[in-house]
Image: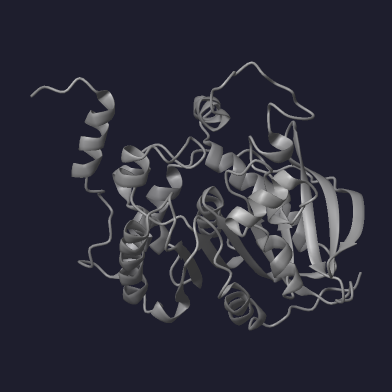
């Protein structure tokens, strides 16, 4: 029988495809990583040039035992972003703490939910549905946390205040940004990652942050950003990928559960998702999987984790890989996070800050 559906054609091609650089154990881990990582990073395209952050403090307040700040910074030419920073209220400003970049997912409110801006029923519902306020909770647990919006969400939402751009109608801005960026030799990933690095550069210079003890965590699309942030920013020492484990032929091609923000040209020609995650080894990595996740089914997620596990074993770093298999839906488990980051960030010696 002949097929007339291009969608079915792509599903078929993806199901048959074997990435050229998938880890098969025929060569050692170090050789595989040295061969594969440069090819993978090349798929991102160019980075927008860094610019001075020109930071401006907008507000500071206390919330539930956490001291919070709202800053305005430049993230690239012709684009600014708000950075939310949180730290334990009881910690003196001169005490330098480990910091965690907290990426949001495809939620309605961007970074605000992650940092527990719950001052509306809609925001509270989103936080409850995904156990989403990990930025706030990790600050209560003794870390500095910080978050910004990636393109299309929060302050960068084209259809909300202050942009009010309705020209795209119902089209997905993540996909439109992909078209724009690739025409310029970039990808939304490379652009958003550059914005994250700008935020890290700014936060690392705050008096209560130790720039040598930085981690990253994020849910779903934020898991995508967590993975790539850890791959591209050498300042990051530990990562938690939350509910972003499966296989592109399944969650991508079959379920169409991805967008232009999460992909790079030719990426699947090179690696599976567990290979991409495995390139982080020997970096400490915590993976969250929801037993009732409707976006990334548990069987597919655990299969991905087993592939990742084989790579960490080959790297001699199995003790640096952890799994939080929690009973929830698509959201943060929160069962191992504080202990994980304390183990892998707090154990790093504090670097004295120069007195100017």
Q: Nearer the viewer, residue 273 or 64?
A: 64
Residue at image position (62%, 50%) is 104
**Residue 183: percent from left, percent from top:** 51, 24
Instruction: Please indicate whether residue 251 sits to the left or right of residue 195 in the image.
Output: left
Quadrant holding the C terminus: bottom right
Q: How many marks?
A: 0
Q: Quadrant of residue 311?
A: bottom left
**Snapshot colouring:** one colour
- In the displayed structure, 212 sits above or below 266; it is below
- In the displayed structure, 296 sits above or below 235; it is above
Q: Quadrant of residue 265?
A: top left
Q: Nearer the viewer, residue 298 or 319?
A: 298
Q: Nearer the viewer, residue 223 or 137?
A: 137
**Residue 266: percent from left, percent from top:** 35, 39
Q: Is residue 198 visible?
A: no
Instruction: Please indicate whether residue 221 sits to the left or right of residue 151 in the image.
Output: left
Q: Is residue 170 visible?
A: yes
**Residue 64: percent from left, percent from top:** 83, 67
Residue at image position (74%, 75%) is 142
């Amino acid at each position: 029988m002949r097929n007339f559906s291009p969608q079915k054609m792509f599903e078929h091609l993806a199901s048959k495809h074997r990435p050229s650089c998938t880890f098969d154990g025929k060569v050692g881990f170090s050789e595989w990583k040295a061969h594969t990582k440069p090819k993978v990073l090349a798929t991102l395209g160019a980075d927008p040039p860094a610019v001075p952050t020109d930071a401006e403090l907008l507000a500071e307040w206390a919330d539930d035992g956490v001291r919070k700040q709202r800053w305005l910074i430049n993230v690239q030419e012709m684009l600014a972003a708000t950075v939310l920073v949180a730290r334990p209220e009881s910690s003196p400003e001169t005490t330098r703490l480990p910091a965690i970049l907290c990426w949001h997912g495809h939620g309605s409110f961007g970074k605000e939910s992650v940092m527990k801006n719950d001052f509306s029923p809609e925001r509270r519902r989103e936080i409850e549905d995904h156990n989403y306020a990990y930025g706030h909770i990790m600050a209560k647990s003794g870390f500095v946390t910080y978050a910004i919006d990636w393109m299309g969400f929060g302050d960068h939402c084209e259809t909300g205040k202050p942009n009010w751009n309705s020209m795209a109608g119902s089209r997905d801005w993540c996909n439109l940004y992909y078209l724009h960026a690739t025409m310029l030799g970039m990808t939304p990933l490379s652009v958003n990652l550059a914005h994250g690095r700008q935020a890290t550069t700014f936060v690392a210079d705050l008096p209560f942050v130790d720039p040598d003890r930085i981690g990253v965590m994020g849910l779903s699309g934020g898991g995508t950003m967590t993975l790539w942030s850890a791959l591209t920013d050498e300042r990051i020492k530990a990562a938690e990928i939350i509910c972003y484990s499966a296989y592109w032929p399944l969650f991508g091609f079959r379920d169409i559960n991805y967008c232009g923000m999460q992909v790079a040209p030719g990426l699947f020609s090179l690696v599976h998702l567990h290979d991409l995650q495995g390139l982080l080894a020997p970096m400490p990595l915590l993976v969250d999987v929801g037993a009732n996740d409707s976006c990334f089914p548990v069987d597919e997620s655990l299969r991905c984790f087993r592939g990742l596990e084989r790579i960490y074993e080959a790297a001699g770093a199995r003790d640096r890989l952890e799994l939080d298999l929690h009973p929830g839906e698509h959201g943060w488990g929160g069962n191992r996070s504080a202990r994980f980051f304390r183990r892998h960030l707090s154990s790093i010696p504090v670097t004295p800050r120069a007195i100017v």
